[in-house]
Image (spheres, grey):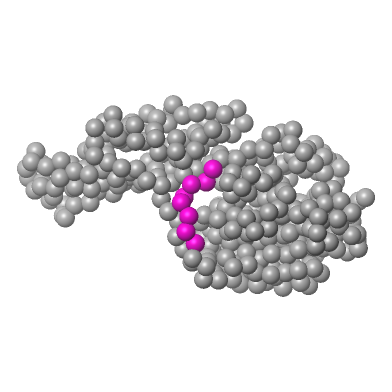
Amino acid sequence: MEIPPPDKEPLLSFLQDIIRIPSPSTKERGVVERVAEEMRRVGFAEVFIDEVGNVVGRIGSGGGKRLLYDAHTDTVGIGNPAAWSRDPYGAEIEGGVLYGRGTADNKGALAAMIYGAKSLIDTDLDLAGDLYVVGTVQEEDCEGYAVGLHCRKLKPHAVLLGEPTNLQIARGQRGRIMLIVTTHGRSCHASTPELGVNAIYAMNKVVARVEALNSNLAQHPFLGPGSIAVTRIEGEGASLNVVPDTCRAYLDRRLTWGEDEELALTQLREIIHEEGVEAQVETLVYESRSHTGYPCRQKKYFPAWLLEEEHPLVQMGAWTVKRTLGYEPQVIGWRFSTDGVATKGELGIPTIGFGPGEESHCHTTEDQVKVEDLVKAARVYAQLALEFLGI
Ligand SMILES: [Zn+2]
């Protein structure tokens, strides 16, 4: 059956409310509380904030299959306010487009999910399973961490991510790992450099090999190639007149299908060995406290994930878009990283993406979403939950 579309006005004014509440990672409390209030107001059966601070709403029977919709409540900062042509927290609507930080990434999807669920609530259908709408935290700083904590407990049968796809279906992304290489040397006075071992010169050899490695990494027809880039170098010595005994280089390594942490580390260890420098390589660690005070700690390793095009969830997503919105969606891979690194990459839960907004607007001063696309997304969210869970 067809679920009636949600009313546009309350969806929009709720979204404007949550855009007007700034919510950088670990400081999502205000938005999370506002989202919980809205979930209660529209009639979710259960609403709570979990230990790490995700806001969780449930509709359905309290048994049967569990479908999880994930959109993150945190946003990146605004950078230089003068670079914005509109107030980044103003949530202005102009020409059918809503503007503001977090609109596309990812509050628009969260509002659409809640109002998609409301459409289902308003039909009085008895779902045979449960739909969980989860507003996650700290996605921008450590994607997958907070949703992973929740999914390990809930064990959903499938996950839909609301990250922007411009109303197409996403089924995977490259993974990533943040690495640090440290070279060691021996300090001496810089006026007699031949008496020491310069850790920066040692790093120079490693960096040249890393640059060459970038064009020799694995390829995948759907996700594209792996990549590696040095993003920062620091030398450390007692003063500018001392040959440094330590140098650190930070590396952003993107992992295509078939590449993992072990491979990335091994490639660098081989370079270090072949260049004969004294060095080690490690994976960086993410540490923070969530807005509830939960101590977060995890390696900055985010596996690639991919769901085959023939998978029933991809097919159901595409079919639901066609039936609800009248077009055959493209099936795409995301360029950026998402909570799918945990839901599918780490936990193996079938995961797809579908969201309003465009990837190219994320993290920019043009963060925006089309008003009509919010309603379209809400319709698909309602219909897909009905198809997946049944009545
Ligand atoms: Zn996002």
Whether 41 is among the magenta residues is no
> Magenta region: which residues?
296-303
Looking at the picture, tell me which residue is in the foreground, 163 or 370. 163
Determine the residue positioned at 53% across, 28% down. Answer: 219
Describe residue 39's horizontal placement relative to residue 84 as left or right: right
> How many badges with numbers are in the image?
0
Residue 345 place in picture, x, y as percent? 59, 44
Looking at the picture, tell me which residue is in the foreground, 256 or 156. 156
* Quarter location, residue 69: bottom right
Looking at the picture, tell me which residue is in the foreground, 301 or 12. 301
Q: Is residue 304 visible?
A: yes
Determine the residue positioned at 68% across, 41% down. Answer: 170
Describe residue 279's horizontal placement relative to residue 76 as left or right: left
Describe residue 72's horizontal placement relative to residue 119 as left or right: left
Determine the residue positioned at 72% across, 59% down. Answer: 133
Determine the residue positioned at 34% across, 43% down. Answer: 281
Describe residue 18's horizontal placement relative to residue 379 as left or right: left
Residue 245 against residue 138 in the figure, above or below: above
Residue furthest right as drawn: 1
Majority SS type along the magenta span = strand
Residue 248 against residue 21 in the figure, above or below: above
Q: Is residue 370 visible?
A: no
Residue 156 place in picture, x, y as percent? 71, 53
Residue 290 against residue 69 in the figure, above or below: below
